[in-house]
Image (cartoon, coloured by chain):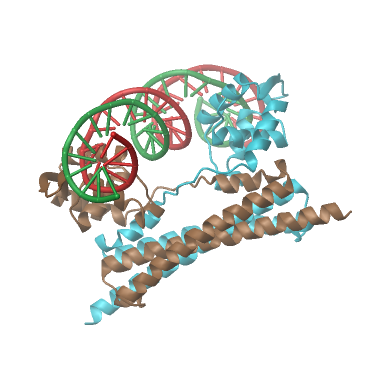
Chain colours: A brown, B cyan, C red, D green
Amino acid sequence: MKVSTLGYAVLGLLAGEAMSGYDLKLRMGDPVGFFWQASHSQIYPELAKLEGAGMVSHRVVAQEGKQDKKVYEISTSGREAVEDWVASPPKAGLTRDETTLRAYLSWLGGANEMAGFFRERARSHQDQLERYRETEARIHRGWGEDPLAMEPQQFASYAALKRGIGYEQEYARWCRWVSETLEARAEQGSEK
Amino acid sequence: MKVSTLGYAVLGLLAGEAMSGYDLKLRMGDPVGFFWQASHSQIYPELAKLEGAGMVSHRVVAQEGKQDKKVYEISTSGREAVEDWVASPPKAGLTRDETTLRAYLSWLGGANEMAGFFRERARSHQDQLERYRETEARIHRGWGEDPLAMEPQQFASYAALKRGIGYEQEYARWCRWVSETLEARAEQGSEK
DNA sequence: TGTACCATGTAATTGGTTACATGATTAC
DNA sequence: GTAATCATGTAACCAATTACATGGTACA
């Protein structure tokens, strides 16, 4: 069977720990959420599909004070599939970025409006950066600062977080540069 | 009418210059292609949709030695629409990045295989970075080095390119760090 | 009695990729 | 002739978002 990237994301999470569709949805927020999101309306059908292919199985677990839930567990074939996939050559991932598109078309807007737009974008990426930095501080307190001393799963989470940090830092930096340059250009234009 | 992001990308390109669907497709390679791609099978229906909404119009232009082509021109309402959109608040753009997902799941693969994977990814992003740097050098030769001295459309292209450079540079740096750290971890593990 | 959260699903729609299809011109 | 590039379209499929839908538990 052909497994989608979402399918591998689900298998990967289940390889770490058996959990319900609801739990998976929560996990696809922070920190996985930064680079792969999925809503429950995608996750439940995907679990059914993976179960049909024999890659996961579920059992119903009763809970006190809460409804029953279906806990999904990865099978041997599911684990093999995700292990084979993880280091396999990726198909070229194309990026679609609306903010960069707006920069490319910024000459269509007023310089002050565009400067405001990028100032706001800078703030938003800076905020996200700071949230990631807090997570990093928690990791350092819990697992130490040396990536060589972490457990494999810990290092894997840490590496993904590092990508988030680098991404947001660079993005915020660029947004600031665009807004400041647009402002300087607007000022220069009005001086004449 | 509701215009999609692709629709605004098309309107934005047509705001700069009237052109055919085929020309639009070529333009959605370099440099726009870095942050927004579209194939001809998406562009032709989109043009028809925009024309139906009165945002673009076309006339058939005969060419010597080549087939006729349909040259699309943006209308006043089309231009207003894209001008309104360009500095409007963006809806939160979610990033899906398969490479970061693989880093997060790297503990499922062999350390050497994973190190190889990220070494290869680093090379690929470094290559792209170098292509962008060449484009930057051409821009500097043609328009000078000072963004304050560029024409608005020139600065807009330059700003988008700068994003590409920052993005690839940071991505390559991170991939190198991951592959080197995985190697160091593998070596350390085999020493015991 | 209403709100928040737990828990699971389906349906409709949009956006995007891949495949199918056609036909002209130019250069080798 | 045949491959490459110009030029335009449709159809089938897949992935993802948004909306529709249901029902339990806890707490104020």
Tell me the residue at 14%/50% (across/down).
A75
Decide: is A149 above or below D2: below
Q: Using residue B152 as the reference point, say whether residue A175 is left or right of it.
A: left
Q: Is residue B168 visible?
A: no
Indicate the position of residue B6 as horizontal and vertical percent values.
55, 35
Indicate the position of residue D14 as horizontal and vertical percent values.
34, 35
Decide: is A80 above or below A69: below
Q: Using residue B177 as the reference point, say whether residue B140 is left or right of it.
A: right
Decide: is A158 above or below A43: below
Tell me the residue at 63%/59% (across/down).
A176
Q: Quadrant of residue A158?
A: bottom left
Image quadrant holding the C terminus of chain B, namely bottom left
Outermost residue on the right side: it is A192
In front of the other: B86 or B143: B86
Q: What is the total number of numbered labels drawn onto the structure image?
A: 0
Q: Quadrant of residue B128?
A: bottom right
Image quadrant holding the N terminus of chain B, namely top right
Q: Is residue B28 visible?
A: yes
Tell me the residue at 54%/62% (across/down).
A170
Q: Using residue A99 as the reference point, say whether residue A154 is left or right of it.
A: left
Indicate the position of residue A36 as horizontal and vertical percent values.
37, 50
In front of the other: B103 or B69: B103
